[in-house]
């Protein structure tokens, strides 16, 4: 089933087994409220809460009492390391950031000996729903890799494939954007986009269609594409995912979607052995809960990749 909205995604994921989550720095009311909302929707069935045990007990919603286990670890670095260890022990399906510092959290995730990173780099993806679009739209990388190389862009795109399978999109359309549709050695984003497009045509990315370089307008507007003479394209005006040339472009665009496009969003870090949620302290409860729904979709996609 092709999923085009968060409501449809939540409905589809409600049929799957509840998630087991572990939270690094769980002494945070917004995190716990999001878990409580997720538990009420049967999205999570077990929660291991790592952090200041006294504070967690003080804030713990009553609806989590029966499904929560608390691991006392007041120090940020120890808290993140313990949460990652829970995942490595096979006791959790998703790692969630609470009040722990982002740097300490990611250090624990990428540790070569005790972390969760697989062979490639981690990357961030945000999925958005906006009134102006008839589908969900993804943005990557808008939070981890500052200025990805061509090789890193290849890995970023491969990191997203399980998610799109989970969304029911077997042939995702990717727009590699730049400031111009003209390929120029003076603009590396254009040469990278052209290279990725050629590799996709050769089948290097499976069923993923990648085209570019495209301007942002061409990626999302058929009228803009036609005005620029781009008429024979599977992606122009219909992109499911935008690959940004750098973190500034991706980060600013997603923030603009939220501020000016009335976007609902959910974000996840990809490239680890499990979905990793890297919430901002300003993220609302709904956004945090939608992150768990997104994690469930990734797990569903991984199961399809494995043939389960």
Image (cartoon, rainbow, N blue to C red):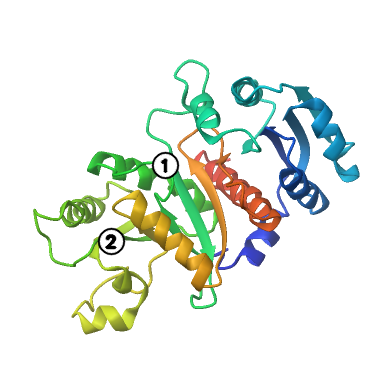
Residue 177 has which mark?
A: 2
Question: Dot 2, crowdedness within 10 Å: few (<14), some or many (≥20)?
Answer: many
Quarter of the image with the C terminus in it: top right
Q: Nearer the viewer, residue 166 or 192?
A: 192
Residue 144 tag number: 1
Q: For mark 1, give the secondary structure.
A: loop
Residue 105 is at least partly visible in this image = yes
Q: Is 174 situated left or right of 257 in this image? A: left
As drawn, 90 above or below 182:
above
Residues 59 and 199: in front is: 59
**Does residue 160 appear to the left or right of 249 in the view shown?**
right
- At x 42%, y 43%, the residue is 159
**The N terminus appears in which quarter of the rendering?**
bottom right
Residue that protrudes farthest toward the left in the picture? 185
For the residue pair 24 and 52, the one nearer the viewer reads as 52
Q: Position of residue 6 (x, y in %)?
A: 62, 64
The image quarter containing residue 276 is top right
The answer to whether 245 appears left or right of 87 in the picture is: left
Q: Is residue 252 above or below residue 91?
A: below
Residue 125 drawn at (x, y percent) = 47, 50
Q: Is residue 294 above or below residue 91?
A: below
């Amino acid at each position: 089933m092709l999923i085009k909205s968060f409501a449809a995604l939540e409905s589809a994921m409600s049929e799957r087994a509840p998630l087991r989550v572990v939270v690094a720095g769980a002494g945070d009311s917004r995190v716990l409220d999001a878990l409580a909302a997720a538990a009420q929707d049967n999205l999570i069935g077990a929660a291991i809460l790592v952090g200041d045990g006294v504070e967690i007990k003080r804030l713990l919603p009553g609806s989590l009492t029966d499904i929560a286990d608390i691991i006392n670890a007041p120090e940020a670095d120890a808290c993140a390391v313990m949460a990652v260890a829970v995942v490595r022990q096979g006791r959790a399906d998703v790692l969630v950031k609470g009040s722990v510092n982002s740097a300490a959290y990611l250090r624990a995730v990428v540790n070569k000996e005790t972390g969760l990173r697989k062979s490639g780099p981690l990357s961030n993806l945000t999925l958005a729903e906006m009134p102006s679009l008839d589908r969900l739209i993804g943005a990557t990388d808008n939070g981890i890799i500052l200025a990805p190389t061509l090789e890193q862009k290849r890995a970023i795109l491969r990191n997203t494939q399980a998610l799109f399978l989970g969304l029911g999109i077997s042939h995702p359309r990717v727009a590699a954007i730049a400031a111009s549709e003209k390929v120029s050695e003076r603009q590396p984003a254009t040469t990278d986009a052209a290279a990725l497009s050629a590799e996709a045509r050769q089948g290097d990315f499976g069923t993923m269609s990648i085209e570019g370089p495209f301007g942002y307008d061409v990626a999302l507007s058929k009228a803009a594409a036609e005005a620029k003479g781009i008429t024979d394209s599977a992606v122009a005006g219909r992109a499911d995912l935008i690959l940004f040339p750098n973190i500034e472009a991706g980060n600013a665009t997603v923030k603009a979607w939220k501020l000016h496009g009335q976007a609902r969003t959910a974000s996840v870090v990809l490239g680890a052995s499990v979905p990793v949620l890297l919430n901002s302290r300003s993220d609302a409860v709904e956004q945090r809960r939608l992150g768990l729904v997104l994690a469930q979709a990734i797990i569903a996609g991984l199961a399809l990749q494995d043939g389960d």
